[in-house]
Amino acid sequence: MQRIEEFSARRRFASCVAAIGILLPAAALAQTDPGPRAGPAGAGGPFASLNAAERAAFAATLGVFAEVDSVSGGVAGEDGVGLGPTFNGNSCAMCHAQPAVGGTSPGLRSPQHPAPNPQVALATLDGARNAVPSFITANGPVREARFVTTTGNPNDPLDGGVHGLYTIAGRIDAPGCNLAQPNFAAQLSANNVIFRIPTPTFGLGLVEATPDRVLRANLAANAGAKAALGISGVLNTTGNDGTVTRFGWKAQNKSLLVFSGEAYNVEQGVDNENFENERADVASCVFNPSPEDHSDLTTDPAGASDIVSFGIFMRLSAPPAPGPQSASASNGHALFTSIGCAQCHTETLTTGPSQFTGMSNVSYHPYSDFALHHMGSTLADGVVQGAAGPDQFRTAPLWGLGQRLFFLHDGRTADLGQAIQAHFTPAQTCVQTQQQYSFTVNGTLHQPHTIDSFCGGSEANGTVNNYNALNASQKQDVLNFLRSL
């Protein structure tokens, strides 16, 4: 109830925010986003210090990550098993492609591998009868779609789940399946659809190897400076063991194995040993025993399933390498820190002990605190995941930003200046919400009571104001620095 009330309050302020937001980007018109950095991909290979066996494992699991799935593995060139009944892609590498396999959404503006959005052709691949939704375009980002509420009525319960773009109906390997696509047009007309684009997977073994104590200490550091800017932040955690979760747009996934299992089921429809059940359990559209992805016990008692291979590929991946830094970019780096960006986009973290060669006690540069921050109604998506509320997002790591094509969780812009301005949401009249339960445990009556005040603003407001106070040359320096990452 509390989060629903807060999100409804945010929606009431949306029109006011939009009106103010029209004025804000004007401050950045004098600057130009240099665009995605040309030259070789600065990522996509194994971590530099791995031994020969670990490098071989990286190469083998890269092949699994790039495998193309069909329904039952019987289509030429599509050897993977388990696609559908609903899906957004047919390969991990289809979506995680820029600037190399393991990255983020491909696109026509890529200097490395220009290509149209593969989700367009996927709609009718192998005889499928899908219509391409209006928000999937040849020059736009790869996207997944979620519904904010279950019905489209803003007063109804939150939905937040992924609704697959396509179904296997009509495919040559899915005879008899007639599962219909969601009615995206109706949901769009009700303003009930939000989007997410793929997050890069480079260097995530370092993130996974970072102890919770390091993340907690980093979040607590510079408390005075953060408070002056209006920055607070919390870490998302698991409900059972209380440890920090850190993967996904809302830091909703604990480990790369969980991240892999969820994505395999949600994005490709492949049930697996982490997520055993079909998402669209229509009898006429289920063609394989569950789990479709499983450890191979017939030929090797320790045979790895696909999701285990995906996790190994990401763990052994090198972080993205920055490009050359000009004098302008170097000055932009200093400004990035002085105006407050680095209070959330932490430049350096350090791993703990790791089983992989050379990954123990390594300082790396993700430009993220991996914490959740309120971003206000400009970016709010209404999705609740763990401790992350409707307008909270994990600080997006900026390493590799220089070669990305689309920005923010939904890919709404390809322009860095616009992405910076979208971090701003003006505070509104504060709304206070409260929540109280009554229950008895072990004969004792409990009545926990919480009160929360939401003022509709973004924790990034102070930093964006500082950015907008820079002169035109300084703003260009910041943009040049970001494109050097």
Image (cartoon, grey):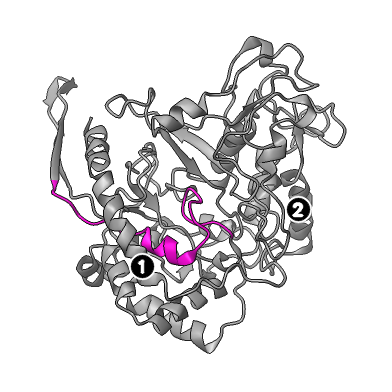
Q: Position of residue 346 (x, y in %)?
A: 41, 68
The residue lying toward the viewer, choosing from 270 and 336, is 336
Q: For the residue labelled by badge 1, is the local secondary structure a helix, a strand or a loop?
A: helix
User: Is 355 on the left-hand or right-hand side of 67?
Assistant: left
The residue lying toward the viewer, choosing from 336 and 213, is 336
For the point 42% across and 84% down, the residue is: 473
Q: List the single residue furthest toward the right.
A: 76
Q: Is residue 485 visible?
A: no
Would you say residue 220 sits in the magenta stretch? no
Whichever of labels 2 and 1 marks the residue nearer the N terminus, that label is 1
Which of the 4 image quadrants contains residue 223? bottom left
Q: Main secondary structure of the magenta part?
A: loop
User: Is 53 on the left-hand or right-hand side of 243?
Assistant: right
Q: Position of residue 309 (x, y in %)?
A: 70, 44
Q: Which residue is mark 2?
A: 57
Q: Position of residue 160 (x, y in %)?
A: 41, 33
For the point 30% across and 24% down, the residue is: 156
For the point 75% across and 46% down, the residue is: 66
Highlighted range, magenta: 405-430
Q: Which residue is mark 1?
A: 26
User: Is 373 on the left-hand or right-hand side of 485?
Assistant: left
For the point 16% across and 21% down, the residue is: 440
Above or below residue 452? Residue 285 is above
Q: List the single residue furthest toward the bottom.
A: 327
